[in-house]
Image (cartoon, rainbow, N blue to C red):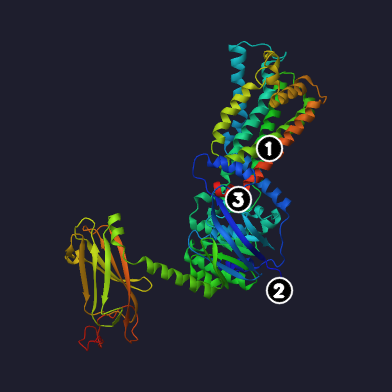
């Protein structure tokens, strides 16, 4: 044993004579992979119930909404669709965005030990957090779509040709917001407490649980102006009606998402040099 | 001369100070607008030095002098507010405990993380992993999350990682003080080999020992500025001298007004006779006055320590059942005679402490240096009464005259 240890020590003394700075992009990719895997394994796959929760939570919500809206309120007009499929198509992306934002907002705190002592681009943490949540929720979305189809609901899978790009637009926007919120959270601890109720209110103001056509004419333009409402409508177009044609609003949405991302990243990069002092 | 491996040029670092409510919101706006914070604490200012490949620099200074900030700037964790840092190679940093560790990751996962942070490919990580595990030598704990580690184990793993990844510059601080002695020896041995093999070291330490042993030059930081920079022996001596002077100043009697305001028992004066020099075996007298805030007679504790702080003997008035003599409503006099000072020649301190009458709370501490003169080849601190003989207990000449 002492022999092997001596040999190890000898091996350790070798010092690279050539100065070798790692290519930044390669390092950042390796870090993203490391953080992303960790987010997935420890938060969802680590515990037996973790993964189940990721799917059960939206399913349970869907069930409760179904009971409240169709049995208690006896609402019947969902643009000619069944309540389940009408809501499921929209609820999943909303919950995915919501969870991604909530988790990302507090994500930097979990890496405080690293941020205080190692030099690396802090935004990778946010990308990994949002990426892991959205990837998992998108997988759940596909499972639910397949399940709905199996129960005879009119899901059109060709709609994914549009739905997938729509999710990507959503992801870009959520990344931007997440960068903004997570950076602010480091300095202002109230962000996470304000976020949840704000998201709750936004959800009810978005035509997720009801069709836009049920909204009274005089406030309809306001509700329709909600970008998430637009996304939900486009997803229903694609997945329930099979309408795949592009609209001018798609380009606007992409532009808005990119603008959000750039703004969020600008704020993040302005504030990130000071994280070390405030985490 | 080749370009320096590390060049720190006129570096300064300000930290934002936010105390009042709403200050953080304003700070965020200031930072977004590209302004500096309204109120700042200047942690570092005008720090410059260069490090050639194969050189070693020790950074010394008191707590809060900016050592950690400087090391963080060199390792890229924080950006300097002013000035620039240029590094021509890979910096391996081992800062504080659990440097760059994620507390929830296992030891193994942290090895992978550290490697990813340094941009190693999975294949390179694979090659290094066994070396690191062997050097850290923490057994099965390598599979436990870091947060369950003892501080010694964290340091072992941290050091193993920082060294195995073959940095061009190794930046490290106090961590060496944490591991157990055998691991410390292993680390020092590694560092000596690393330096002998052309490695470059930036070491930050309170302990002059490590700096003197490992570093060719030293930089003394004081309140964020470079107080002195140069040859290790010269800088560390200046630093130690500064501290001796500072502690000597602190040991003078507290002014009566201060003692009264603070309501503490305080030594007011201390005189040594015959003087600061006393011949070995002669009489030494210690006398002085002590202030009592409530007029009750305080306890006086007198101790003799060697110049390096090693305690030799201490005795208090209440141990011997005596009390200082009242000379005024709130002042008492004391005097202690040591008829034969059998200390070996050298420098010593007489320390006098004021305690409350119960002998429980220690309030004050005044110190006077004295030198025991004489010529002898005896070793140690004191001359113990002794005699030589040819078997145990024989009556012979008393060796101590």
Q: Which residue is mark 3?
A: B109
Q: Is residue A258 above or below residue A14?
A: above
Q: Which residue is mark 2?
A: B1
What is the x, y in percent for residue B186? 54, 67
Name the residue at 47% across, 66% down.
Answer: B181
What is the x, y in percent for residue A69? 61, 15
Q: Is residue B163 above or below residue B25?
A: below
Q: Are marks 3 and 2 on the same chain?
A: yes
Q: Chain of mark 1?
A: A
Disc 2 is placed on an element classified as loop
Q: Is residue A279 visible?
A: no
Local packing at callout 3 (Cα closer than 10 Å; few below 14, some 14-19, many 20+) is: many
Name the residue at 66% across, 67% down.
Answer: A15
Q: Is residue B112 visible?
A: yes
Name the residue at 62% across, 26% down.
Answer: A58
Q: CA distance from mark 1 to mark 3?
A: 29 Å
Disc 3 is placed on an element classified as helix
Mark 3 touches mark 2? (CB < 8 Å): no
What is the x, y in percent for residue B1? 71, 73
Q: CA distance from mark 3 to mark 2?
A: 42 Å
Q: Quadrant of residue A73?
A: top right
Which of the image's four quarters has the N terminus of chain A?
A: bottom right
Local packing at callout 2 (Cα closer than 10 Å; few below 14, some 14-19, many 20+) is: few
């Amino acid at each position: 044993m002492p022999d092997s240890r001596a040999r190890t020590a000898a091996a350790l003394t070798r010092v690279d004579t050539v100065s070798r700075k790692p290519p930044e992009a390669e390092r950042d990719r390796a870090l993203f992979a490391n953080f992303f895997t960790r987010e997935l394994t420890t938060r969802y796959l680590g515990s037996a119930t973790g993964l189940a929760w990721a799917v059960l939570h939206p399913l349970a919500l869907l069930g409760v909404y179904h009971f409240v809206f169709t049995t208690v309120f006896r609402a019947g007009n969902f643009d000619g669709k069944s309540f389940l499929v009408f809501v499921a198509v929209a609820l999943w992306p909303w919950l995915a965005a919501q969870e991604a934002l909530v988790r990302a907002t507090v994500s930097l705190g979990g890496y405080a030990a690293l941020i205080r002592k190692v030099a690396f681009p802090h935004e990778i943490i946010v990308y990994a957090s949002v990426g892991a949540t959205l990837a998992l929720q998108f997988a759940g979305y596909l499972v639910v779509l397949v399940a709905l189809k199996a129960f005879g609901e009119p899901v059109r899978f060709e709609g994914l040709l549009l739905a997938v790009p729509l999710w990507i637009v959503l992801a870009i926007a959520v990344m931007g917001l997440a960068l903004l919120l997570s950076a602010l959270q480091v300095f202002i601890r109230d962000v996470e407490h304000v976020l949840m109720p704000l998201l709750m209110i936004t959800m009810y103001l978005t035509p997720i649980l009801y069709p836009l056509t049920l909204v009274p004419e005089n406030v309809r333009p306001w509700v329709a102006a909600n970008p998430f409402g637009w996304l939900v409508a486009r997803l229903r177009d694609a997945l329930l009606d099979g309408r795949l044609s592009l609209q001018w609003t798609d380009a606007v949405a992409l532009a808005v998402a990119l603008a959000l991302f750039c703004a969020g990243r600008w704020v993040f990069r302005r504030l990130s040099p000071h994280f070390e002092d405030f985490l | 001369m080749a370009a320096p491996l590390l060049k720190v040029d006129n570096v300064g670092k300000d930290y934002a100070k936010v105390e009042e409510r709403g200050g953080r919101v304003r700070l965020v706006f200031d930072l977004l607008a590209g302004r500096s914070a309204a109120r700042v604490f200047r942690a570092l200012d005008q720090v410059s030095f260069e490090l050639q490949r194969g050189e070693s620099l020790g950074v010394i200074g008191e707590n809060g002098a900016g050592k950690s900030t400087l090391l963080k700037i060199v390792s890229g964790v924080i950006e300097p507010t002013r000035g620039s840092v240029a590094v021509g190679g890979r910096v391996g940093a081992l800062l504080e405990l659990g440097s760059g560790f994620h507390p929830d990751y296992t030891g193994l996962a942290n090895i992978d993380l550290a490697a990813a942070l340094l941009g190693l490919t999975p294949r390179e990580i694979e090659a290094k992993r066994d070396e690191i595990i062997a050097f850290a030598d923490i057994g099965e704990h390598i599979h436990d999350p870091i947060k369950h580690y003892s501080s010694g184990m964290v340091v072992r793993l941290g050091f193993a990682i920082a060294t195995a990844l073959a940095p061009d510059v190794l930046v490290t601080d106090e961590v060496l003080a944490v591991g157990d002695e055998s691991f410390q020896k292993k680390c020092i041995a590694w560092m000596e080999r690393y330096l002998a093999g052309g490695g470059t070291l930036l070491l930050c330490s309170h302990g002059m020992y490590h700096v003197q042993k490992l570093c060719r030059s030293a930089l003394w930081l004081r309140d964020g500025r470079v107080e002195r920079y140069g040859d290790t022996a010269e800088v560390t001596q200046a630093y130690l001298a500064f501290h001796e002077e500072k502690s000597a100043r602190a040991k003078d009697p507290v002014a009566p007004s201060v003692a009264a305001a603070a309501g503490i028992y305080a030594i007011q004066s201390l005189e040594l006779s015959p003087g600061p020099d006393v011949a070995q075996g002669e009489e030494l007298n210690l006398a002085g006055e002590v202030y009592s805030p409530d007029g009750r007679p305080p306890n006086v504790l007198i101790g003799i320590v060697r110049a390096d702080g090693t305690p030799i003997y201490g005795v208090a008035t209440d141990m011997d059942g005596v009390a200082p003599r009242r000379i005024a409503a709130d002042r008492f006099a004391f005097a202690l005679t040591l008829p034969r000072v059998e200390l070996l020649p050298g420098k010593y301190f007489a320390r006098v402490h004021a305690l409350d009458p119960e002998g429980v709370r220690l309030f004050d501490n005044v110190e006077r240096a004295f030198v025991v003169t004489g010529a002898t080849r005896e070793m140690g601190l004191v001359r113990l009464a002794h005699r030589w003989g040819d078997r145990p207990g024989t009556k012979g000449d008393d060796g101590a005259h």
